[in-house]
Image: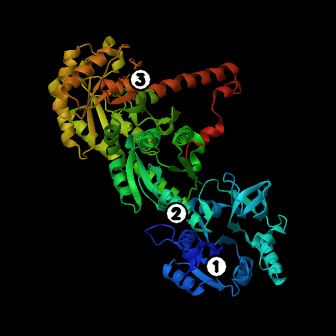
């Protein structure tokens, strides 16, 4: 594709401004060197176009010298119209015809347009001419008659079914050829004093030129000093406007830079860095924290300002900064981001802002980078540290039970979009109860550590979320120190050990079975030994207190909690089997009076009425849904088995089941 700029004319209506150079060299931004032509060439140079044909005439040598001084990197061809003062630009095109055997971007040399107009033109898949459906029809300038979205006729005397039009065209080779042949015919028969559009009009639509409606965007020719003043004021406005884009990515690749560059052309670019909490809510905990991502963007040339966006919703940011333009990929027109987009559109409309959407393209090169980043998350060193970071970022995190690869995938991938936000579990809980039950065994530390580690591996092979491991009593201190290191190697973030000794039974049996609580001294020693054995700084050991389960009272629970924190526990889990949450609330309240920092972990299986946000307000930090997936699958499986037994075939059972294809699809072919 080539560009053709028509610069032969006299520009006589500009008065003294064109006494020493052609009109296209008129300065359009006070205090800068930018001229009509330098701006056009700059926009062209930002595209894939390499060659520009410029017709000259009036002050042609000044013009050629000027163009060369601009160092645009473009390949410029100058074609002089020797009779520029006696002919119209139709003849200049005729003179340049041998250079124009390609798709052509055609523009008059006195045209000033904003980058968005040029982007729209370049993106058009068909030949088109810029028109405006909202500007008033000019008396003396070009108008186009439009029929079915196509330009039928262009001229100054057309008022019916017409729109304001500017001589800025994209012409596909075939359409251009038809028009150019007509131009040649005109010129060779001596009709050189008319517009090139007179030739176009004789084609009666055969050139297939669509109307590209640029509405209120700047696209104006400069004929006289008044036009110049208007354009200068508009350009100043454009320069002052702010453009907002929000980013959540950990890395910046060529695709991001390309879109940043595009957005920068619209005004002063302000970048929003999505907070760690907001990113974690819909994607995953970012690899690079928001504070560092902020620095990354602050150091990109031409970024005017970087702010933090704390929620997926743009509301707070838009209301505070009122950017003139928000830029986003058009991928958010559907799916979970649609409500966020709708809100942006309505807030922008409330103060006259505008949304600019670029077509979303997924480049395999960048997808590969994303896939690599995702798979890095599964690596032990990266996975292990993410629980602590998430806890710091969010204050309260949730973990769901996973007892094999399949349930791991469910915890990994289940997302619910609600109230403009996305909700998913932050971590996985590898429960002793569910791990044992999945093997048909009782929850009494019968399933040995080697087998429990195998479960962890089944899960880590197919997921990336952090893992909290139910370490039961931790076993003998001499064994626990080995367990700690093995868990660290596996990429587990936290082990929870409970202060029981002897034959452990599940806590939810409470005092119905015999269970022995360990002494504070012994258990503190186990914690100390575990902390000493650990090799990575992020691994956490959580002490689980069974005093309420075993009905030893609140004072005992609190005494233990403070003792275990003093022994080095990184978190405290308090458990209860009561439906009523009040003893848990009392514990949190009293613990928090003395210790504001140590994370509190809860397993609200019985006391399940309180919502996560309320737990956060009370002062809890990790909510573990310890067994719900297993308890959901058992009745579903039993029902399917009974139905088949009853009906002596599987047909009736089929309606209870997920389609066969879906189960195949839910497992990715590769990680
Ligand atoms: C587990 O999930 O194995 C637990 C929590 O330890 S509970 O079953 O409530 O004791
Ligand atoms: Mg357990």
Label count reads: 3
For this rendering, which residue is in front, 391 or 457? 391
- Quarter of the image for the N terminus: give it: bottom right
Which residue matches tag 3? 611
Q: Do the residues labelled 1 and 2 touch (CB within 8 Å)?
A: no
Q: Give the distance between the C-alpha atoms of the residues marked 1 and 2, in whole angstroms.
A: 21 Å
Q: Give the distance between the C-alpha atoms of the residues marked 3 and 2, in whole angstroms.
A: 58 Å
Looking at this view, name the residue that lies furthest to the front: 15
Q: Is mark 1 on a helix, strand or loop?
A: loop
Q: Do the residues labelled 3 and 2 touch (CB within 8 Å)?
A: no
> Crowding at label 1, few (<14), some or many (≥20) Cα neighbours within 10 Å?
some
> Crowding at label 3, few (<14), some or many (≥20) Cα neighbours within 10 Å?
few
Question: Residue 115: x percent and y percent?
Answer: 56, 62
Residue 517 shows in this picture? no
Question: Residue 133: x percent and y percent?
Answer: 69, 52
- State the residue at coordinates (79%, 72%): 179
Tell which circle, 3 or 2, labels the residue nearer the N-terminal end. 2
Question: Residue 320: x percent and y percent?
Answer: 41, 42
Q: What element carries label 3?
A: loop
The answer to whether 616 is drawn above or below residue 665 in the figure is above
Question: Residue 185: x percent and y percent?
Answer: 83, 79
- State the residue at coordinates (17%, 24%): 520
Q: Give the distance between the C-alpha atoms of the residues marked 3 and 1, in whole angstroms.
A: 76 Å
Which residue matches tag 1? 10
Ligand 1 image position (quadrant): top left
The answer to whether 158 is drawn above or below residue 491 in the figure is below
Which residue matches tag 2? 232
């Amino acid at each position: 594709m080539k560009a053709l700029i028509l610069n032969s004319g006299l520009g006589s209506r500009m008065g003294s401004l064109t006494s020493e150079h052609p009109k296209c060299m008129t300065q359009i931004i006070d205090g800068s060197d930018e001229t009509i032509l330098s701006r056009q060439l700059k926009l062209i140079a930002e595209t894939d176009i390499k060659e520009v044909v410029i017709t000259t005439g009036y002050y042609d040598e000044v013009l050629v010298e000027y163009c060369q001084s601009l160092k645009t990197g473009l390949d410029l061809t100058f074609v002089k119209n020797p009779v520029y003062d006696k002919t119209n630009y139709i003849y200049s095109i005729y003179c340049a015809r041998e250079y124009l055997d390609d798709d052509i971007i055609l523009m008059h040399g006195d045209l000033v347009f904003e980058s968005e107009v040029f982007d729209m033109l370049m993106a058009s898949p068909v030949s088109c001419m810029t028109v405006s459906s909202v500007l008033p029809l000019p008396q003396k300038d070009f108008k186009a008659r439009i029929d079915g979205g196509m330009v039928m006729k262009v001229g100054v005397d057309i008022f019916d079914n017409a729109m304001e039009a500017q001589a800025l065209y994209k012409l596909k080779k075939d359409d251009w050829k038809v028009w150019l042949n007509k131009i040649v015919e005109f010129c060779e028969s001596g009709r050189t004093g008319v517009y090139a559009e007179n030739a176009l009009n004789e084609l009666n639509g055969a050139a297939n030129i669509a109307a590209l409606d640029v509405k209120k965007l700047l696209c104006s020719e400069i004929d006289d000093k008044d036009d110049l003043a208007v354009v200068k004021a508009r350009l100043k406005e454009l320069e002052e406007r702010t453009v907002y884009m929000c980013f959540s990515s950990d890395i910046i690749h060529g695709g991001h830079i390309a879109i940043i560059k595009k957005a920068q052309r619209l005004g002063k670019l302000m970048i929003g860095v999505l907070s760690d909490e907001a990113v974690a809510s819909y994607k995953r905990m970012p690899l690079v924290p928001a504070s560092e991502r902020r620095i990354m963007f602050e150091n990109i040339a031409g970024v005017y300002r970087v702010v933090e966006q704390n929620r997926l919703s743009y509301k707070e940011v838009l209301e505070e900064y009122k950017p003139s333009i928000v830029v986003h990929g058009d991928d958010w027109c559907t799916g979970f981001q649609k409500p966020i987009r709708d809100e942006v559109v309505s807030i922008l409309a409330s103060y006259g802002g505008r949304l600019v959407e670029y077509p979303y393209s997924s480049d395999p090169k960048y997808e590969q980078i994303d896939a690599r980043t995702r798979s890095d998350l599964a690596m032990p060193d990266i996975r292990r540290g993410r629980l602590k970071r998430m806890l710091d970022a969010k204050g309260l995190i949730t973990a769901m039970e996973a007892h094999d690869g399949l349930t791991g995938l469910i915890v990994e991938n289940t997302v619910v979009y609600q109230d403009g936000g996305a909700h998913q579990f932050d971590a996985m809980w590898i429960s002793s109860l569910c791990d044992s039950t999945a093997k048909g065994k009782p929850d009494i530390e019968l399933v040995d550590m080697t087998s429990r580690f195998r479960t962890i591996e089944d899960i880590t092979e197919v997921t990336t979320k952090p893992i909290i491991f139910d370490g039961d009593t931790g076993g003998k201190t001499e064994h626990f120190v080995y367990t700690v290191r093995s868990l660290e190697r596996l990429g587990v973030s936290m082990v929870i050990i409970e202060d029981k000794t002897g034959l452990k039974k599940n806590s939810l049996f409470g005092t119905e079975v015999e269970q022995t609580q360990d002494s504070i001294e012994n258990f503190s020693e186990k914690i100390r030994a575990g902390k000493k054995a650990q090799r990575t700084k992020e691994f956490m050991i959580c002490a689980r207190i069974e005093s309420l389960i075993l009905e030893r009272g609140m004072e005992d629970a609190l005494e233990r909690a403070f003792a275990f924190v003093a022994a080095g526990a990184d978190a405290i889990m308090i458990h209860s089997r009561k439906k009523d949450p009040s003893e848990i609330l009392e514990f949190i309240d009293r613990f928090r009076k003395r210790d504001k920092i140590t994370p509190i972990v809860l397993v609200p299986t019985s006391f399940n009425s309180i919502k996560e946000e309320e737990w956060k307000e009370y002062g809890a930090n990790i909510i573990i849904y310890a067994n719900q997936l297993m308890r959901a699958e058992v009745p579903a499986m039993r029902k399917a088995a009974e139905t088949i037994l009853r009906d002596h075939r599987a047909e009736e059972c089929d309606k209870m089941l997920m389609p066969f294809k879906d189960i195949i699809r839910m497992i990715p072919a590769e990680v």
